[in-house]
Image (spheres, rainbow, N blue to C red):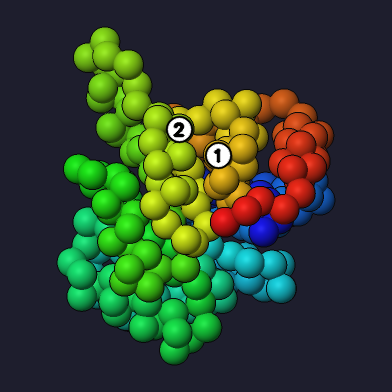
């Protein structure tokens, strides 16, 4: 499949999110993500506003669902999301419910392995239950906590090749990647490239990063799209 560039709108204000999304689309981004902070701040309203402003553009609702799987996925689908996120650490029945809601409402399910003791097994578990994509994710708090102890900060690149080899669905790597690392993920066989905190968003303030973001994003998108087809 061809590489896909997704921007994570980890913002807490819908107006700023819409402005950033418009800029990202002009720069060549393929998918928009209603990040967890945006969903917490704006809820279904935020997803509806994104859908109204960008008809036809895939929208990922990063719910990080842990329970009430069918209802959460259904609500986001009706608001205009095309993709929803469920956690591997949720109960098996919750994941099954999200997958069923995806089938019933025409949305794709992204399974997130954040916090799994065995990240590879977590990814395989999600695929076996019917998830359409795997998000290989090292969490924000986990990275900061380990770094504060003076230890090496973990990276999703550490096991990315193993994750890609273990599953037969597209993989996305998330969590503390530098710009160069994010651009390199298709080389690992992971065609879904997410850009967000701290690449294009200020990770601490959750505001759009300073500088010429549009020009930077355009160059990033060109570099990622230049990979061509990635074997899954």
* Spatial separation of the CA atoms under disc 1 and disc 2: 9 Å
Identify residue for label 2. 157
Q: Which of marks 1 and 2 is in front?
A: 1
> Which residue is rendered at x = 76% and y = 37% of the image?
223
Dot 1 or dot 2, earlier in sequence: 2
Q: Whole-percent x and y of residue 146?
A: 26, 22
Where, by quadrant of the figure, is residue 56 drawn? bottom right
Q: What element carries label 2?
A: helix
Q: Could you tell me if residue 208 is visible in this image?
A: no
Image quarter of the N terminus: bottom right
Kindly check if marks 1 and 2 are in contact, taking CB atoms under 8 A apart as contact. yes
Q: Which residue is drawn at 29% across and 79% down?
A: 97
Going by the picture, which residue comes out furthest to the top?
150
Residue occupying the far bottom of the picture: 104
Q: Residues within 10 Å of mark 1 (few under 14, many from 20)?
A: some
- Mark 2, Cα crowd under 10 Å, few <14 / some 14-19 / many 20+, is many
Using residue 231 as the reference point, say whether residue 157 is left or right of it.
Answer: left
SS category of the residue bearing label 1? helix
49 to 171, vertically: above or below: below
């Amino acid at each position: 499949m061809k590489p896909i560039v997704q921007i994570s709108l980890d913002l807490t204000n819908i107006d700023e999110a819409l402005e950033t999304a418009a800029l990202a689309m002009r720069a060549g981004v393929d998918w928009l993500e209603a990040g967890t902070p945006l969903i917490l701040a704006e809820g279904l309203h935020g997803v509806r506003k994104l859908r109204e402003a960008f008809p036809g553009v895939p929208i990922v609702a990063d719910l990080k669902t842990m329970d009430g799987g069918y209802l959460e996925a259904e609500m986001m689908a009706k608001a205009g999301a095309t993709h929803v996120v469920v956690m591997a650490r949720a109960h098996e029945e919750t994941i099954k419910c999200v997958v069923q809601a995806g089938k019933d409402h025409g949305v794709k399910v992204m399974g997130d392995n954040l916090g799994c003791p065995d990240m590879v097994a977590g990814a395989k578990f999600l695929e076996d239950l019917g998830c359409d994509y795997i998000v290989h994710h090292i969490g924000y708090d986990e990275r900061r906590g380990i770094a504060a102890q003076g230890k090496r900060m973990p990276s999703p690149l550490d096991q990315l090749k193993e994750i890609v080899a273990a599953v037969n669905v597209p993989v996305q790597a998330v969590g503390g990647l530098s710009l160069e690392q994010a651009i390199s993920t298709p080389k690992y066989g992971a065609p879904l490239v997410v850009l967000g905190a701290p690449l294009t968003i200020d990770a601490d303030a959750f505001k759009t990063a300073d500088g010429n973001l549009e020009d930077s994003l355009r160059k990033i998108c060109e570099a990622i799209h230049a990979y061509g087809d990635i074997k899954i």
